[in-house]
Structures are given as structure tokens and as C-alpha cells.
Amino acid sequence: MRRDTEAGGGAATGGRGRTAAVRLALIAPPAAFLALFFAYPVAAITARGLYDGGRWHPERIALVLGEPGILHVVWFTVWQAAASTVLTVVLALPGAYVLARYDFPGRRVVRAAVTVPFVMPTVVVGSAFLGLLGRGGLTEQWWGLRLDEGPAAILLAHVFFNYAVVVRVVGSLWAQLDPRQEEAARVLGAGRWTAWRTVTLPALAPSVAAAAAMVFLFTFTSFGVVQVLGGPRYATLEVEIYRQTAHLLDLPTAAVLTLVQFAAVAALMALHARGVRRRGGAPALVDASRTARRPRGARQKALLAAVLTQITVLIAVPLAVLVERSLNGPDGYGTDFYRALASSDASGGTFAVAPLEAVGNSLAYAVAATAIALTVGGLAAVALTLRGPGGRAGRLVRGFDALLMLPLGTSAVTVGFGFLIALDEPPLDLRSSWILVPLAQALVGVPFVVRTLLPVLRAVDDRLRQAAAVLGAPPARVWREVDFPPARRALLVSAGFAFAVSLGEFGATVFIARADTPTLPVAVARLLGRAGEASYGQAMALSTILMVVCAATLLALEGVRTDRSGEL
């Protein structure tokens, strides 16, 4: 008996040892990728700014933060992020409810439509709002009102950009909450508002907090939108880092601002991780297909109509303006701007090649970046799925999970410039290599792959893996036979998200894309930087092409999406 116990304990110890060894083997490649292509470039550019003459200069932090202009940038960054977050949550919660609980014709198309802005390049979003609210925009033509001279355009563009975050994160939980709990409270005498406030709201609160933290994170690090709409008076930390680095070559100031942004992002990521953990404990979840119903009665139909109207005004109108501006040429409506994209001469020397070649470049880079993101993110997700004794995630796993999200909130400008500074010597002299752009884009895609795959892999019964292992299946076959079948659709979804965000990456790519191989966002930004109606029209045409590619990708994703296909 004792020998059996000892044998069982030995087998259990051996099993834990094998699990730990497999987890470390799976973590090693993603950790090496992040260390080499994220931590090293960021550390290199930060050290370049604060290390000089053989010693560190921490006093530069106080000197930089003491400048009135920098304080204004920090204040505006925090203020606009907080205001954008409040606006986005307030305006998007009704949409999250309707898309989660109402079943109506075209719901999949609406879900895809609200997600299109999130994966569009930020410069394109800025361009769309410039066409709507700026000089010669619709609001000026109709009411003589320009909103691009203050922060209003930035706030509205951030709502447009992040509406999908609230709809996806809050809506995915709202769709699975058991409505019978709220109905029971009403049977016991509670009013409609009291039942919602005491039953549904507490269950949704962690999800709303997590979504708000993500929106604050994205708006705190906003670059393209503010670069286009902010002008000289409104700059976020990200824009100021770009200005100090690319225009003024003031690396010490850029390094200090990078550290400030990094500290703020780390605090936000801690809040986000806490929100995700709390959301994982939400009670009484049911199949989402059981909660969706056709709207009934005048009140529900009015709510559906109000939300669809809101989505039309907030999401569809800016996109429609983008298309209208791309077709509105000097001789009336036509395809002049699209045809001009095929000639490098039409860009007035902005490009060494025809702007239309940016479409092929972006697609090729996005395919390579997606392959890298799937490999790195897939290995990381499988490693995070493996559990320690008692099914608990250890500190190593939790810390690695948080580390994977850091590139999403770190200055893309810093990463891009860090690539040029750090990866310029053998054996890692990649300055002239095409792989530099996909590597930078994959850094943004990896968090989306991990967050999409994790819920699916964690839903697989671990006893199936253990049974397969006991029957002699090696780890690779266990994954192929047990994990891969349910994860196959999630892999397609994560590949689509990685592809879409790679297409739209701008902050890092603007530093490392070569003049003869520009990407779509870089080409749009260069055209917007030129004066003249022709350049502006071509920028709108390129933006429209990119929008169509992103929309087609998302519509395809809706066709393979499952209710457990991740947190976005």
C-alpha cells in the first residue's frame, strides 16, 4: 500500500515535472521573441537618452517633467483619455446590449461594421474625421461649423475607434448572463431599474471596468488620430515622443517621455488583468443563443432603432464621408484619384513608386506578420493553458500573460525607432531587411492571437489531455487530437485579427518602411502631409481601399466566429 502511494506520488511528481518542462519549452520561443524585438529595442532607445559620458543621468527626468510644455502634454494626454473613455462607455453600452440580446436581420453585418474602425489605421480614422469635421467638411458645408480646431474631433474619433471594444468585451458577457435572475428579482417585487441595478449591473461591472481600462489604454497611447486632428496645440505623449525623436532628435526628452508612458501603461495593464480575472468568475452563464430574442413591443423596437441610428451616425457616416471624398474630384464625381494611384508621377514626387504598390506591400507584410504572430502567440497561448498543481496559474504564468500584453500599450514610435537604433549591427543588422516591418507588426498581432485562443483552449477539459497522455500519446499528438479540433475556428479568427491589425499598424512602420516599399498607412500619411487637393483625394482613395480590405476580413471572421472566440 505504501509502495503504491509512493509510486502514485512519484508519478504525480513526475507529471508535474513534465508539465513544467513542457511549459518552459513552449514559453522560451515567445519570451525570446519579445526580449529580442520588444524589450531590447525599447531598452536601447531609453538608455541612449539617459546614459551618457559613462554614467546614467536620472536628473534628466525631473528636468524634462519640469518643462511647462511637457506638463501640458502629460495633462492633455490624461484628460483626453479619461474623457474619451467616459464618452465611449456611455455611448457604446446600449449598442453592447442590443447586439448581445436582440436577434434581428443583419446583426452579423452590424457587428462587423462596428469592428471595422478598430482595425483601421489611426491615420485613416483621422482622415475620415478631417473630411467630416474639418475644413471643407460636411459640418462646415451644412452648418458652417468646424470641430477640428478643438479637442472635440479627437474625442469623437476615439469613440468611433473604440466603440467595438465595449461592444465586444461587455457584449460577450452580457449575451451569456442568465436573464432569469433579473426576471426572478422582478417577480419578487423589484422594479425594472432596481432589478437591473442590483442583479445585472454587479455582474457586468468587472467587464465594463476591463473595457474601460482597454479604451483608456488605447486613447492614452493615441498617435495617428491626434497627429492628424490635433495640430500644434493638442499632442499626446505618443505624438510628442515622435516629434522629439524624428523632428528635434532630442533623445533624452523622448526617453523620459517613454518611461512616463511605460509606467502609466504598466499600471493600466495591472488594472486590466484584475478586471479580466474578476470577469472570469461571473456567475450563472448560459449559452448566448438562449438569451437573444426578437425585439418585441414599441419600447424594444424603439431602442433597436435608436442604437442603429447611433451606429449609423457614429460609424457609418465617417466611413461614407471617406468614400465620398475619394470620389469627389475636381471635375465632379469619378475615379480620377483611384486611377492616379497607379502612377508615381501623380504623387508629385512623394513616392519612388506608384502609391498603388502600397496595397501589395501591405498585404505581403501582413501575411508574414500574421504567420509570425500565430507562431509566437499560439505557443504562448498553449503554454498559458497548461496548469500547475490544483489547476492554478503560478506567478510565472501570470507574469508571462501580462508581459504578452505590454507591446499593445507601449509606444509604437519608441519600438519603431528602437528597431533602427538596436538592430543595426551583426549578427542582427536588419536595417535593410524586409523582415523588419513584419516583425514590428507581429508585436501588435501577438496579444490578439493570445486573447482569442486562450478562452477556447482553457475550455477544453484537462482530463481529456491527461487520459490521452496516460494512453501513451506524445504531447504533440495530444494537442493535435484534443486541443486543435475546438481551437481550429479560433485560430482562423485570431489569424484574421492579426492580419487586420498588421495592415493598419502605423506608429512603428512609419520609421522602418523603406521609401520604395511603403505600406498603406504610411502612404496615406505621406499623401496627407502634402498640400493640394490631388494628394488629399489620393489619400482618401487609399484609405477607402484599406477600409474595404479590413471590412472584408472582418465579415469573413463573423462567419467562423464562435461565442468563445476570445475577448475581442
Image: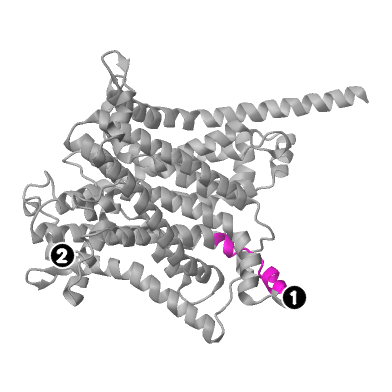
Q: Tell me the mark number nearer the camera, choosing from 1 and 2.
A: 1
Q: Quadrant of residue 513?
A: top left
Disc 1 versus disc 2: distance between alpha carbons? Answer: 57 Å
- Residue 297: within the magenta? no
Left or right? Give the position of 314 relative to 287: left
Where does label 1 land, which residue? Answer: 188
**Residue drawn at 48 percent across, 38 percent down:** 404
Label 1–label 2 contact, CB within 8 A: no
Which quadrant does the N terminus fall into? top right
Where does label 2 land, which residue? Answer: 135
494 in relation to 44, above or below: below
Q: Secondary structure at mark 1?
A: loop
97 in relation to 561, above or below: below
**Residue drawn at 11 percent across, 52 percent down:** 530
**Residue drawn at 69 percent across, 43 percent down:** 462
* Residue 500 seen by the camera: no
Is disc 1 surrounded by few (<14), some (14 to 19) or many (20+) residues within 10 Å? Answer: few
Amino acid at dot 1: Leu
Q: Position of residue 327 (x, y in %)?
A: 17, 68
Q: Position of residue 280 (x, y in %)?
A: 62, 51
Which secondary structure type mostly characterizes the magenta part of the structure? helix
What residue span does the magenta drawing correspond to? 172-185
Q: Secondary structure at mark 2?
A: loop
Is disc 2 surrounded by few (<14), some (14 to 19) or many (20+) residues within 10 Å? Answer: some
Amino acid at dot 2: Arg
